[in-house]
Image (cartoon, rainbow, N blue to C red):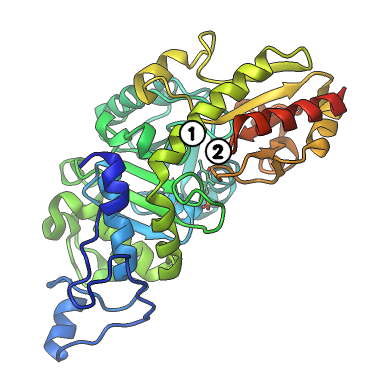
Amino acid sequence: MRRETIAIHGGFREDPVTKAVAVPIYQTASYAFDSADHGAALFNLEVDGFRYTRIGNPTNAVLEDRVAALEGGIGALSVACGQAAVNYAVINIAEMGTNIVSVPQLYGTTHTLFAHILPRQGITVRFSEDDRPASVEKLIDGDTRAVFCESVGNPAGNVCDVAAMAEVAHSHGVPLIVDNTVATPILLRPIEYGADVVVESLTKFMGGHGTTLGGIIVDGGKFPWAAQGRRFAMMSEPEKSYHGLVFTERYGAAAYIARCRAVSMRNSGAILAPVNAFLLLQGIETVALRVERHVENGEKVARFLRDDRRVAWVNYAGFHDSPYYTLTQKYLGGRACSLLTFGVAGGFEAGKRFYDALKLCKRLVNIGDAKSLACHPASTTHRQMSAEEQNKAGVRPEMIRLSVGIEHIDDIVTDLDQALNAAN
Ligand SMILES: *Cc1c(COP(=O)(O)O)cnc(C)c1O
């Protein structure tokens, strides 16, 4: 099936008992065993089935299968939000005394997790100078457990060279983890370019309506965990927290996502509520259509801003003179994301006047809603960073980030126009 069809049908067949066509919400904590032996077999992961919703739920399973199919992976784990997905994706393979290497252009909270939280747990995060694969490669050593990047950075709007990044990681025996939140699998499937693990915040374009938090981890199923000696011992040697199970032996290609569920999720429990899985599934049904309109409106807004003397600069990967133009052609089929940044002429104070004058566009810290959204990263999402860290992450003091929605383009432009007048 094509992505437009998977988004609507993936992972679900009409319910055999009730014939329900919509995915039922299984609002249950637990599932009955046929017998003591059946319960034991479930706990030993010897048979498939559900035990307790912290480990799996049938509604969540539809979401997991649907997004895995959209991304071209072999399995997925849904979690409470995108941040939980990033955290689990890393701690599933990194532990005290090891490191990961990350590009610097990251979502603000991911940067905080990497710079301040993981190091306290003994996992060092090495930030490369920029997003060039060669800069990342310099920092990889024998203790590295993964390379991390965002396919399209939020808010920087940079487009990573995923194939080259995967090649660098693989040549050193480590997997590539890609946050695909901004691009969505409608515009880009990182696994097709060599990524091993994909994480997404489903809160954004996938859910698409700004109502529901959710996250997902997708396993590409190709990384040879057992072939790296003891580097991924948690995958290829007996797991103490699961009475000696060896994940690569039991699950083969799906070892990573099986461990993520059975170890990370089971023991620290950032589960996605089944009702939220249902709401996200409703959003995902229209993701292909919405992304198409987001892309179209994003381009029109970028052109409007660029031709305007009240605007100092516009950062939009769809412009020929953008440093990311070529990568946008290669990875996004020329469809630059509707996330763009610009500076209002007149600096910080003019930027603030512009921001306060917006009427249709909401002032908030979200992206990927049907509604047009505006954010001032320096005072919100990225305020915990030093000026130097902000600069490396692609954040400037006067910068406004727009997530262009799917309203009528004329109404969006009218709002931006009146706010630019107010700024002047
Ligand atoms: C929003 C976002 C996250 C975090 O997702 P939540 O669902 O808010 O926890 C992670 N990465 C990127 C790129 C994001 O935009």
Quarter location, residue 76: bottom left
Estimate how packed mark 1 is, as few (under 14), some (14 to 19) or many (20 or more) residues with alpha carbons within 10 Å: many
Q: 224 or 342: which is nearer to us?
A: 342
Relative to 330, does residue 273 appear above or below in the rendering?
below
Task: Name the residue at 55% across, 44% down.
Answer: 370
Q: Nearer the viewer, residue 98 or 306?
A: 306
Q: Residue furthest top?
A: 321
Q: Is residue 388 left or right of residue 78?
A: right
Q: 374 left or right of 330?
A: right
* Residue 6: % across, % down: 27, 47
Q: Which residue is mark 1?
A: 293
Question: What amino acid is labelled 2 in the image?
Answer: Ile
Q: Quadrant of the C terminus?
A: top right
Task: Locate residue 273, reporting x and y percent.
Answer: 44, 69
The kind of residue tagged 1 is Arg
Q: CA distance from mark 1 to mark 2?
A: 6 Å
The residue labelled by disc 2 is 406
Image quadrant where one finds the N terminus: top left
**Residue placed most toward the observer, 251 or 28:** 28
Q: Are marks 1 and 2 in contact (CB under 8 Å)?
A: yes
In this view, the residue in front, 210 or 159, is: 210
**In the rendering, which numbered label is found on residue 322?**
none
Residue 16 lies, in percent from the top left, at 17, 73
Q: Quadrant of residue 44?
A: bottom left
347 to the left or right of 372: right
